[in-house]
Image: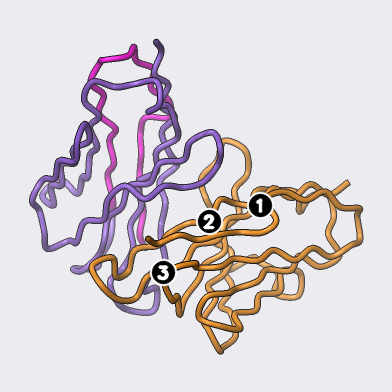
Amino acid sequence: GAVVSQHPSWVICKSGTSVKIECRSLDFQATTMFWYRQFPKQSLMLMATSNEGSKATYEQGVEKDKFLINHASLTLSTLTVTSAHPEDSSFYICSARAYSGGARDTQYFGPGTRLTVL
Amino acid sequence: AQKVTQAQTEISVVEKEDVTLDCVYETRDTTYYLFWYKQPPSGELVFLIRRNSFDEQNEISGRYSWNFQKSTSSFNFTITASQVVDSAVYFCALSEAGGTSYGKLTFGQGTILTVHP
């Protein structure tokens, strides 16, 4: 149980295009999902908290208009990187928080999406 | 503010050696969770353990064991008889159990463990 999927696993795009990344909790419902960014050999940096049915909460320094988050259902959150530029190239990871049962409050992570902007 | 410190940036051991990964945390909350995650070269974070701040019992799961000591704000992770497959980056993390930052994880910088055959 507690499987989180991400799609795509990797994407290469041209500068100026938008990229959408999907995060799905496959066998549990997640009212809250989180989006992280990880640079090589660094820790995870929280970008935003995504709550089902409401606006995402962004961390300080993260551009809301740049990184659009939609959490339309209890099993799906999407991150859209708008007008991507090379500096947006990174490893993006989502997590879903279980809110019931023995694993309550545990975050389960997706496999990540490697974005390369040319 | 919460903070998690993993002082060991990299550890290198030979297979079958025991290895301990240190984790020290700071928080003003009385109720919180501590976690360990493993990130193998594939990149996916694998959940290993969650510990509630009220539960100081140590835990053992196969070759893995965890030592939680509130008195020293530490949550150390020991791998017994390490194997090459244990090679990965290990992250210690902390989250509040309530409040405005409920559920947000604060990660340590990670420890790169390399187990040589």
Report if residue B12 lies within the magenta region: yes
Residue A39's place in the image compared with B55, above or below, is above
| Residue B62, quarter of the rendered image | top left
Mark number, residue B11? none
The 10 Å Cα crowd at callout 1, few under 14, some 14 to 19, many 20 or more, is many
Residue A108's place in the image compared with A9, above or below, is below
Mark number, residue A110? 2
Which of the image's four quarters has the C terminus of chain B?
Answer: top left
Parent chain of label 1? A
Residue type at numbered disc 1 = Thr
Which of the image's four quarters has the N terminus of chain B?
Answer: bottom left
Q: Which residue is mark 3?
A: A97
Q: Colour of chain A?
A: orange
Q: Residue at x 56, y 51 (%)?
A: A111
Q: Colour of chain B?
A: purple
Parent chain of label 3? A
Q: Percent position (x, y) of residue A98?
A: 37, 70
* Nearer to the camera, B12 or B39: B39
Residue type at numbered disc 3 = Arg
What is the magenta range?
A: B1-25
Determine whether the residue tagged by mark 3 lies in a helix, strand or loop.
strand
Left or right of residue B74: residue A6: right
Parent chain of label 2? A
Residue type at numbered disc 2 = Gly
Report if residue A49 lies within the magenta region: no
**Disc 2/disc 1 C-alpha distance (Å):** 9 Å
Q: Indicate which disc, 3 or 2, sits on the residue closer to the N terminus.
A: 3
Is label 2 in contact with label 1 (beta carbons under 8 Å)?
Answer: yes
Q: Percent position (x, y) of residue A49?
A: 53, 73
Q: Percent position (x, y) of residue A57?
A: 56, 78
Q: Which residue is mark 1?
A: A113
